[in-house]
Image (cartoon, rainbow, N blue to C red):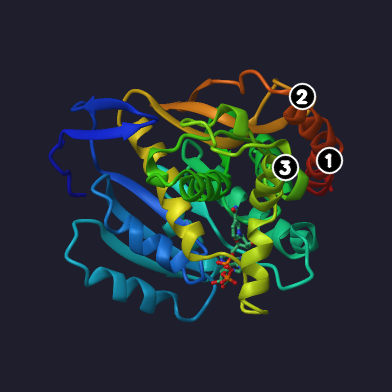
Amino acid sequence: SRVLKPVASVAVQNGAKTFSTSGQNNYKVVVAGAAGGIGQPLALLLKQNPLVSRLACYDIAPVTPGVAADLSHMDTPAKVTGHKGPEELGSAIENADVVVIPAGVPRKPGMTRDDLFNTNASIVRDLAQCVASKAPKALVAIITNPVNSMVPIASEVLKKAGVYDPKRVFGVTTLDVVRAAAFIGEINGVDPRSVTIPVIGGHSGVTIIPLLSQSQPAVKLSDQGKIQELTKRIQEAGTEVVKAKAGGGSATLSMAYAGARLTNALLRGLNGESNVVECAYVKSDLTEAAYFANPILLGKNGLEKNLGYGKLNAYEQQLLKEAMPELLKNIKTGEDFAKK
Ligand code: NAI
């Protein structure tokens, strides 16, 4: 396989400039669900990532080889392969460094993320099983909803196979962070990319906890009522899109952007870059929930250090309290499914 020359890269993360020349810059990334509403634009963005040398597009949809052929005509170095159907899953996953999973059904108006559980649980289980046998060291980033339950399922499957490393399995909550930054940027009249805002907990309704008190710069909102309104808007932003798409699915473009951002962060970590920090939903002992989202430091083995969530104000403590029963229930649902 082609080895790209290490290229020095400079990146800005949470205001800190980091620099790396140490890496290999030739990672294999798999998108499982690559023909979908998220998968296609996600693959489009990853095809442009200089850290990606091989991009494997896996899906069960007949259009999959076409999506790969289409992407392969882009004049960027990543070599694209298409893999359609379960018999081609192994070749997609083998030797993967990162497996990103947006495979599964999305919400329609009136549905909660939990309504997707029955269909999506077995999809994620089967994909995790293949990761366990073909790329047990890969970093796995799960976009499929309900994320709160899918991460426990994948983790249990990897555990059963004897290859589980809690530092390598991530639930993708980046879209919550991206949305919070977009809304705060608008309120403050600043470039949203200059906003740092931790979003903790999980990825559905009340389990999405934006820590507005920790926003940098501070959110320019005068009263607590407005803070609560913004909190609710961030929690319900996915539903805003589901309603606006009127039966045509849920967020795909902003999700692809967010998924590409987290994948890039995982790759920068693998590549030896320092100070790579993102929020993600990971195995955790910070709270009574076995999985929890908050800022984490990424490194050569995935999760390098859990950075915790700092000091919560009274309102945020209340939000966390309200989130916990839901989060615990979601985790149990996932674990019970995997144990069946
Ligand atoms: P979509 O229906 O447009 O695409 C899903 C793709 O998965 C389809 O191409 C389908 O053929 C494929 N697929 C189904 N079963 C498969 C299997 N066994 N193996 C491989 N591929 C399979 O759905 P969309 O909009 O792309 O959403 C995908 C998932 O992402 C949904 O579960 C949705 O709820 C979730 N999502 C998560 C977000 C997050 O923040 N984590 C945000 C938005 C959506």
Q: In the rendered image of this protein, does residue 266 appear above or below residue 87?
A: above
Instruction: Determine which of the numbered discs, if any, sits on residue 228 in the image.
Output: 3
Which residue type carries mark 1? Answer: Lys
Q: In the rendered image of this protein, does residue 245 appear above or below residue 28?
A: below
Residue at 68% x, 44% y is: 226
Mark 2 sits on what residue? 314
Residue at 79% x, 62% y is: 118
Q: Nearer the viewer, mark 3 or mark 1?
A: 3
Horizontally, is 192 left or right of 220 in the view?
Answer: left
Which residue type carries mark 2? Answer: Ala
Identify the mark nearer the N-term, 3 or 1. 3
Q: Residues within 10 Å of mark 1 (few under 14, many from 20)?
A: some
The image quadrant that residue 120 belongs to is bottom right
Horizontally, is 189 left or right of 171 in the view?
Answer: left
Measure the alpha-carbon separation of dots 3 and 1. Answer: 29 Å
Horizontally, is 304 left or right of 170 in the view?
Answer: left
> Residue 289's x, y, as percent?
77, 29
Inspect this view and state whether residue 5 appears. yes
Q: Nearer the viewer, residue 321 or 7?
A: 321
Mark 1 sits on what residue? 332
Inspect this view and state whether residue 150 appears. no
Q: Nearer the viewer, residue 122 or 284?
A: 284
Measure the alpha-carbon separation of dots 2 and 1. Answer: 28 Å
Residue at 68% x, 72% y is: 243
Give the quarter the ligand 1 occupies.
bottom right
* Element class at badge 1: helix
* Element class at badge 2: helix
